[in-house]
Each structure stands twice: as structure tokens, then as C-alpha cells.
Image (cartoon, helix red, strand yellow):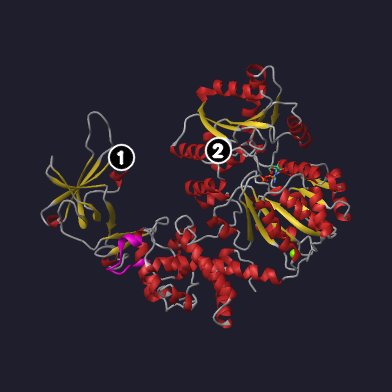
Amino acid sequence: MDLSTPLAYVKGIGPQRAAQLEAKGLQTAADLLYYAPFRYEDRSNVKPLSALAPGEMATALVEVREVHTPQFKRRDLGMFEAVFGDGSGARLTGKWFHGQYLRNVLTPGLRLAIYGKVEFDSYTRELTMLHPEFEILRDDGEEGDASLHTGRIVPIYEAAGKVSTRMFRTILRRLLDDLPPLEDALPRHIRQAWKLPDLNTALRELHFPAPESDLRLLNTFRSPAQFRMIFEEFFWLETGMALKRGNARTEMGIPFELNDRVREKIKAMLPFKPTTAQKRVLGEIARDMASPAPMSRLLQGDVGSGKTIVAAQAAVIAVENGYQAALLAPTEILAAQHFFYLRKVFQPIEYPVALLVGSMSRKEKESVKQLIESGMVPIAVGTHALIEQDVAFHKLGLAIIDEQHRFGVLQRRALQAKGVTPDVLVMTATPIPRTLALTIFGDLDTSVIDELPPGRKPIQTVHKTSLEIEQVWSFVKREVDAGRQAYVVYPVIEESETQAMKAAQKAYEELARDVFPTLKVGLMHGRLPTEEKERVMEAFKQGEAQILVSTTVIEVGVDVPNASVMVIEHAERFGLAQIHQLRGRVGRGAAQSHCILVTDRMNDAARERIRTLVGSSDGFHIAEIDLKLRGPGEFLGTRQSGLPAFRVGNLLRDQEILELARREAVAFVESPPATDELDQAKRYLRDHWQRRYGLALIA
Ligand code: ADP
Ligand code: MG
């Protein structure tokens, strides 16, 4: 038996349980070994009931004697009680509020281990435990030694189908005993520097902590064994990332020339003075572009910080060197926005810009493709249509990808495959918390624009309930009378753009007819044909409409500096990042801007989101809270998020270990104590972690 043995062949598991374990993603002996308990209980204090004292945390081995469901006159609390005995003469009653479901579980005669805080009920004069933890004891010989489950610090596992926490204990005990000692691939000098236990010790301690272990450390995942396992997981990921970055540096890309002519062009194009942050970031990008190695850079910045213009500057460098630049956007509307923006930006230097999106007619597409292929247009903007198989670039030198985390890694590669080895600049409109940036974009170098263009007044955000909507409308009216414009946005409900469209449509009719009969109101949603969308946006931009009712299609990219009010209806239904993005549509001009979050009934999570938004306009802070509220998977969107499946590590909990692992990994790859140690590590990485982490081809 070794680490790769399928679980069906591990003693004591068999095909049925193996199937249930597989449903939880556990396929091999290694998977099981790295399946960490999520909690530990100190059951070393096992006592007969007669020896229990009120106030202590204790474990007792008992039998269910009788059960009750006491009725209360005024209120049904669904109380469930079980009276336990153990032959010591004493009794103890377990009590559960809303415990009716236990009626079929805790039947008289059943033997249990119970664990909890002993209390004394002065009214009934009996010992009680409120909501004790319990485990059913069976004599089916399948559970191994009873000492696994009591009389020690006991690991608690998340069950997998019918595989209970007890079975996990039994199986893992056996596995740990039967498995030959494992090779510890973590470099020795790192283990020594951080006093990490070796792999075999760590695995044993992870599952069966020694009696003297610190329970508090265990339950905060900071015992030496847990720390090592978490560190190891992050270390291999970051080593893989560091190797990938290193490989990219030795690849042949394009050494773009940065001469005075290029600088002059950039200057001639710029419509305003760049901020210090923009200058710094352009410097970082330009350095990458000038180097012969292909650039892989992530450009982060809060909404409105001016990322697009920096990307446009980078495009000038490529074009002046005789190459093309492509900008990829996640949605058609955003692609169209970028197209209009870039067309305007490049007017002074007369660069033609092409737009290619899926909804264009075949004939239109054909002619645009022709332009791209012949090299007639230096700049192409589009959705994924731009990287479909049959689009060929004449000479692609720079690929700018907006909103990367909605794009798959594969698409990035597909685009890269279109050029020689184009430089790649990834822009994200949603700030990404550092832990996520390190894990999903760990192979990219990072630039951050941490400064807003001058003259921006912070947006004032307020919360109103739908009962106060009249107030909101009169506020909007006043702003419009003062020459401003306003957005009114409706959410996409449960991913159904159709419903949102209907809500927006209905609101549009009411607002246009009843609320603002003297104003011009526009309507925008995802189902409009591309030209219609463009027409509506253009009309709003030109000030022909004062109010734009929309679904969230305007979430990113829309840029109308005169718009100063953003009303978000049903704000309780939007995600944090989404509202922050929407809010970024205003506050782009000199006027004081306002964001009004209108809500109906809210649950706690929604209240927390609204509070966060009213209290902060810092995209990075909001992203951190968002990550905490939703967890990494949801935060990134489940589809193709590129998030590695960690087994022990947890990005929310283990940020400092991730940082440490990254530092150690970078130092190790850059200056390993001996080259054969690095070679060894590469082999280990390839055999054990590459597939899991989707780290393509570490040579
Ligand atoms: P982002 O893409 O980062 O959300 P944009 O690139 O859309 O931000 O920029 C927001 C707005 O600010 C645009 O109208 C842009 O032209 C303007 N802008 C960007 N940089 C500056 C600057 N340095 N000075 C003045 N305006 C700027
Ligand atoms: Mg380069």
C-alpha cells in the first residue's frame, strides 16, 4: 500500500464506503491522510455519572434510559430530553431545544459517549447537560479500539455520506499504522528554520494529538502539526507559482523598444495628467514590455482609479513597435464601452480601433476579422469572440484582459497562442484580497493603482427603505434640476436577467409616466440589441436622457462623468462587490455624487453588506469583507475560478501562513541550498501537486 492506493483497496473501507468517500473528493490513501479533523474534543476526562461535578466539561459513557418531549404551556420550544444512566447509580438528563429530530435517533437502550458541560438543575435537583455532543457506540466490531473515541483528545471529522466521524477515526488509525513511513519532501532547512515536525509525525498528530496537546491551539488550527500541514500545502503551491514565473522569464517574448518617439505618442494621446500611481504602474509595465521575457502582469486598482488609460498607454508601446494590441472584456456591453473609450482616447494619434463581439452579423464579423488579420487595425477590442479559433492576428504583441477572474486560464492561453508570445496584462475591476491574489494570480507580477484621479469627491452613500422611496425620487429630481444625471438600477434576481429586465421595464414605465413626467428617462438591459444599447448609452452620455433605468449590465465600464446619483433598488439582493462596482459609475466628475441603497426586508448578511457599503468606499476593504462573508469559492464565482482545492489550508484563516509559505518558496526557488534539492522538489511537485493545483508543465 502507498499514498496512491485507491480507497476501495484500503483495509476496512471497501467499495461501498469508497464510493461515499469519493463523493466527498477522497479517492486515495493520500486524500484520506490529508483529510483533517475540523475540530477536536478533550475526552480524556471520562467519569462515571456519580463522579460528575457541576461546572466541569466531561465525557461519560452512558445508555439511554428514557426520553421525554416536555410540553410548555405558552410556547413550544420543541424541547427534547433524554435520561442517561451508566450503572453508577447516578443519572443525567440531556436537553435539546428544537430537538424533536432526535426522537428517532436517541432510542432507549442505545449506548452513547456524551460530552459537554455538567450542570445542576436546582429545580428538578438533577444533573443536566444542555445540547451535549454525543456519539453512538456500537458493538459491531467495525469501530476498532474504544480508546480511539474516548479517554483522549478526539478528532472530529465531517461525515461523508454514511461514513461517520467514528469510522474516519478507525480507518485513519489503521491507515497510519499500515502505511510505510512517508518521504518528507519539504526542504530540510525550512523545516529546521521553522521547527516544523516531519511529515510522519505531523500526520499522526493531526489525526491523533498527543495527550499533552493544547486543545485551544488545535481548535484554532495552530498546533505544530496543523501548522506544518497548512504550510506545506501553501508552500508547494507557491513553489509551483515561483517556478512558473521563473520559466516565463526564460521564454522568448518581444523586447519592445521604448524610445522618444513612443514617449511622444503616449504624451500626445493622454487627455490628462496621469496620477503618481498611474505613472509608477506604467513604469512597471513598460519595464516588463522592454524586457525580452513575456510580461504576465496583474493590474489592480479600485473602480475609477484609471486602469484603462494605463492599458491604453501600454497599447501605444506595442503599436509603435509594429505590433497589435487586443483588449478582451467579459461582456459585450463592456467590450462596447471599452471600444468607444479607446476610440476617443486614440483619436489624437489616429489609431483605428476594431470591435468584435459575438452578436455581430456574420458579414460584419468577417470584415472585422479581415481587418485584424491584415494588420489594418492595430487595436482590437472584443469578447471571447476575439479568441475563437478562426480569428488570426497579423502580429499580436500585447493582450489586455479585463476582469480576468471571469475568464478561464485556458482562454488566456488561447489568446497567448495567437501571437508569438504576446505580453499579457490582466486588469481586474474588482479588487482582490491579497490571499486570493497570491493563490490564483500567484504566477503573475502585480501592479496596484492605489490613488484616484485628482478632484474626486468621495461618494456619499446612504441607506433608505422602500417606504422612503418618494424622498429618494425628489432628491433625484433636485439633482437633475441642478443639471446632473442619475442611474436607477434593478438587480438580476437569481441569475435571471429576464426577471430583472421585467422589473427594470416596469420601473421605467412608472418613472417615465408618473414620477418624472417632465424628464427624459432611458432604459437599458442585457436583452437589447447591441446597436440599441449603444444608442441608449450614447443618448445618456450626450445628456439627452437625464435618468437611466437599468439592470446590472452597467456594472462595469460605463463612464458618464455628469451622472452624480446612483439609486440601487433591492440593494439587499446585490453582492458587496457588485454594489461597489455600480457605485463606481458615479463620482467621476467634479460634482458631489450620491449612492442611495434602497432595501426591502433584509436578513443579517444583507444588513452587514449595507453597513459595510455605507461605511466604506475602499474597494480593497470591501473585498476583504466580501471574502469573509462569502468564502473564497463564492467570492470568485464557482465557474472556472482557478482556485486551488486546498485540503488543510484555509485562505480566510491562514493568511499569515500563506505569506510565510510564499516568502519561503520564492527564496527556495531563487537560491536553493543545492541544485539537486530544487530538482528533487520539482519532481515531488510534479508527482504530487501539479494536477491538484493545475500548475501546467513545470519543467
Ligand atoms: P477604472 O477602469 O480603473 O475603473 P477608468 O479607466 O474607467 O477607471 O477611469 C475612470 C475615469 O477617470 C475615466 O473617465 C478616465 O478617463 C478618468 N481618468 C483616469 N485617469 C485620470 C487622471 N489621471 N486624471 C483625470 N482623469 C482620469
Ligand atoms: Mg516583453
Q: Dot 2: within a 10 Å radius of its alpha carbon, few (fewer than 14), some, or many (20 or more) residues?
A: many
Disc ID at residue 170? none
Of pointers 2 and 1, the one earlier in the residue sequence: 1
Disc ID at residue 98? 1
Residue 71 picture location, percent across and down: 22, 34
Residue 467 picture location, percent across and down: 50, 22
Residue at coordinates 67% horizontally, 17% vertically from top-left? 517
For the residue pair 39 and 546, the one nearer the viewer reads as 546
Residue 329 picture location, percent across and down: 71, 48
Residue 509 picture location, percent across and down: 66, 21
**Residue denoted by label 2:** 574
Instruction: Determine whether, in the image, residue 416 is placed left or right of residue 491.
Output: right
| SS category of the residue bearing label 2 | loop
Residue at mark 1: C-beta within 8 A of ligand 1: no
Identity, as a three-letter code, of the amino acid under mark 1: His
When the figure is inspected, residue 576 is found, relative to residue 694, above or below; the finding is above
Residue at coordinates 80% horizontally, 48% vertically from top-left? 269
| Range of magenta residues | 206-218
When the figure is inspected, residue 508 is found, relative to residue 159, above or below; the finding is above
Ligand 2: quadrant of the figure: bottom right
Q: Is residue 129 visible?
A: yes
Query: Which mark's residue is nearer the viewer, 2 or 1?
Result: 2
Decide whether residue 217 is among the magenta residues. yes
